[in-house]
Image (cartoon, coloured by chain):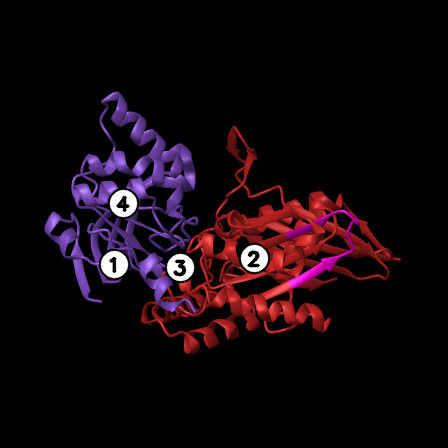
Chain colours: A red, B purple
Amino acid sequence: MKDIDSAKITEEIARLCMEANFELEGDVLRALEEAAEREESATGKEVLDQILDNSEIARTERMPICQDTGLAIIFVEMGQEVHVVGGDFEEAVNEGVKKGYTEGYLRKSVLSDPVRGGNTGDNTPAIIHLRIVPGEMLKIWVVPKGGGSENMSRIAMMKPADGIDGIKKFVVENVRAASGNPCPPIIVGVGIGGSFERCAQISKRALLREVGSEHPDPFYADLERELLESINNTGVGPMGLGGRCTALAVHVETAPRHIASFPVAMNINCHAARHKYVEL
Amino acid sequence: MAEYSIETPMSKEDALKLKAGDKVMLTGRIYTARDAAHKRLVDLLEEGGDLPIPLEGQIIYYVGPAPTPPGKAIGSAGPTTSYRMDPYTPALIEKGLRGMIGKGERSEAVVEAMVKHKAVYFAATGGAAALISKSIVSAEVIAYDDLGAEAVRKLEVKGFPVIVAQDCHGGNIYKEGQAKYAR
């Protein structure tokens, strides 16, 4: 049994909320730098240079990369030997979000009632995805997710007969239709299989993979490569203004499915692909 | 692709010379508003009431900035997606709004109003919010304080970098640019 103090969880979540909003991970930065070199459109290059300048300003001055500091989405893998003491786990997470969004001068973008509004004032509640796993580690990913890219994400309950071609058509057409709205260059998480809600969840989890990595199964690695090429051939480009760099990466994640269903989800991340990780 | 420096308020002559793809550095006063504020403004127009902001020759920036850290004029302040303001925009353009700054393509109805009344749509880089905040010299909430980040603000900007995304001649960099780089 390993005791972990709920106060420690609050402290770490607060820190990660801020860090994720101020500093891009190395793999995302590298991908943006490569895109700036590769981009053929002068306007596209200009946009990418601004994005890179922005990331430096945000990092050094501890200002948010984007004013949309997002919903706080928290993925947790809790080892079954972990024993949270001192307070309620979910409360500790939400206290951390409140603390991080207040101390970091981050934007409070959460409305308590989806139809009637009412800003909660502290960017809570967080959206928590929790798995209990073997072991005694508490693993936390904090993923601030903005509205623009989220709004262009889609899910379809396809027919098994639609197959790989159906997936490709769905993803590429939606990227084209989304145009500049999700702030390309984007990262696309593609979920295939599972149930309706599991499919959407894994499409978001796919966004956490290192940019530049490929799916361990060559079959799906090929699909990732083909999707990336097709997406970049749409010509949507940085901010939809036209160019060769529409997506930095496509990550596929799969799950077993019902014999009669074929759910496919695409969760789009903008170029501010923000996530930070800690192990306790 | 030309480069211009433009000072607000913007004249019809300024609007007419701009073409999709041109780079512009904006200086002067601009106003901010998002969906909720736009609804209030358009409702007021319909009721015949007075707006809290002038429209003739003015530019509205679609932004909900992050809170202002100590010692700064404004927090990170990049554009929000413009299509959400499409339903409200033609009414404002009819009453003299000359420019809009946001991100993403505008609807046909908006373009129709832009062409008819000589208004221009500028794109700022989404997610370059800290960089953009450097060109904002001062910021003040002037209406709809209850909307928090979505309140109407008066901004003084200097050298705010934007691109003409859709001009008053029907030019559209989204369509033109994407067609050019598609394979």
First-in-chain label (3 vs 2): 2
Amino acid type, residue under disc 3 in the picture = Gly
Q: Is residue B120 visible?
A: yes
Compared across the picture, whether A108 is left or right of A208 comes to: left
List the residue tagged with mark 2.
Answer: A169
Q: Nearer the viewer, residue A249 or B39?
A: A249
First-in-chain label (1 vs 4): 1
List the residue tagged with mark 1.
Answer: B20
Q: Residues within 10 Å of mark 2 (few under 14, many from 20)?
A: few
Please say if B12 is above or below A118.
below
Secondary structure at numbered mark 3: helix
Residue B111, label in figure: 4
C-alpha span from label 3 to label 4: 17 Å
In what quadrant of the picture does the N terminus of chain B appear? bottom left
Q: Nearer the viewer, residue A215 or A94?
A: A215
Amino acid type, residue under disc 4 in the picture = Val
List the residue tagged with mark 3.
Answer: A240
Res B117 quadrant in image: top left
Res B88 quadrant in image: top left
Judging from the image, mark 3 belongs to the subunit labelled A
Amino acid type, residue under disc 1 in the picture = Ala
Judging from the image, mark 4 belongs to the subunit labelled B
In what quadrant of the picture does the C terminus of chain B appear? bottom left
Disc nearest the viewer among 4 and 2: 2
Asked if marks 1 and 4 touch (Cβ < 8 Å), the reply is: no
C-alpha span from label 1 to label 4: 13 Å
Q: Are marks 3 and 4 on the same chain?
A: no
